[in-house]
Amino acid sequence: MLSIALNAAVLDRAAVRPYLDLIRAPFLIFTLVVVSLPVAVAIEAGVFDPTNTGLAFGSVLFAHIAVNTLNIASDYRTGIDEDTDETPYSGGNDVITSDTLSYRHAVAVGTVAIGVSAALAAPLMLEFGWPVVLFYAIGITLVVGYTDLFARIGLGETACGLGLTLLPTIAVGYIQAGRLLDPLGALAVPTFLVGFNLLLLNEFPDVEADAKNGRVNVPVVVGRRRAGYLYVTLVGALVVSLVVPVLRGALPATVLIALLPIGLLVPVFETLVSAEDPTLGEDELGRHTLWVQTTIGGLSVGMLLATLL
């Protein structure tokens, strides 16, 4: 009986694993990191609503699943996966090209994820009306249009900054009390910059494949070197976007803890600034990914510290 149970468990894991690969499960933790920021702002303001937060988190999570899945399906349909080398941070996913799952499976999972996301958002739309409807409409437009529209007209990085970081931060904050909490306005720029840079650097390994398959992004248009300069410039802009609101009293000084992870990027900066055509290894992409997560997390910790000091 024990051997039967163990075999069944192994089969269950084997059946589930392709779907975890399809939705890029390890990257979904970023949704939790992003949502932690408006939650910290709400706690600091004394208006945290756990029920609404749970609904909003679920809606954002399934929207994230949808964009990951539909992106993989689109890359398979357009053939871009055949020209990329998969890494933990770029290069797509071979779950369809290896015939583990079909293209139709991927589209179905993405479509179901959108449906679940909408169902979880519906009570919030009914409670708060048109602002949440507008937030959700923009979010789903970014989800559905990211791969086949925005990434092909030079707006992929902007869509990522809006849909993955800025919009969830504003929307989850809004449903806490039916209003835009003051610190969220000051956090709009830094959260957008982190989301923009997240995609910008992850595009570096796939420049040739992206260009060949019709994607129009910053590294394709201006080249890796100039895109690298832009990345470094935007990290500098992030520093300014936090220091200035702190000096003006719009944000507590504790949020400056979010600047500490910039130290992770020193080797990345060296490559981007010194190389004629900078290519990035897994270590540098890993540092970049960790910087993204810890910067948003640092903002959350900074807002929570403000409640204690």
Image (cartoon, rainbow, N blue to C red):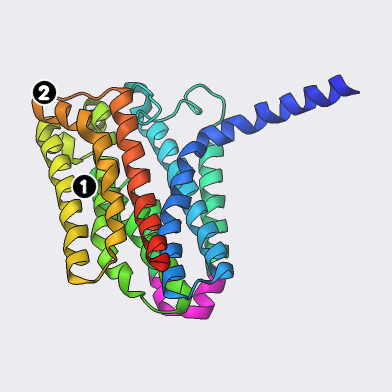
The reply to whether residue 136 is visible in this rendering is: no
Q: Can residue 130 be seen?
A: yes
Label annotation for residue 275? 2
Q: In this view, does 120 lie to the left or right of 147?
A: right
Left or right, 106 with respect to 152, comes to right
- What's the distance in space between the residues labelled 1 and 2, CA to CA? 27 Å
The numbered disc on residue 268 is none
**Can you give x and y, in whole percent of width and height, for residue 159 in the image?**
29, 52
Q: Is residue 114 above or below residue 287?
A: below
- How many numbered markers are drawn? 2
Q: Quadrant of residue 242?
A: bottom left
Kind of residue sitting beneath label 1: Ile
Dot 1 or dot 2, earlier in sequence: 1
Asked if the magenta segment contains residue 129, the reply would be yes
Q: Name the residue under label 1.
A: 153
Magenta stretch mostly in which secondary structure? helix
Does the segment drawn in magenta span residue 56? no
**Which residue shows up at 51% across the image and 35% down it?**
22
- At horizontal 44% and vertical 79% (from top left) the residue drawn is 178
Q: Is residue 37 left or right of residue 115?
A: left
Q: Pointer 2: residues within 10 angstroms few (<14), some, or many (20+)?
A: few
Amino acid carrying mark 2 in the image: Ala
Q: In which quarter of the image is the N terminus?
A: top right
Range covered by the magenta-colored residues = 122-134
- From the image, which quarter does the C terminus lie in? bottom left
The label nearer to you, 1 versus 2, is 2
State the residue at coordinates (36%, 75%). 180
Q: What element carries label 1?
A: loop
Q: Residue at x 57, y 57 (%)?
A: 116
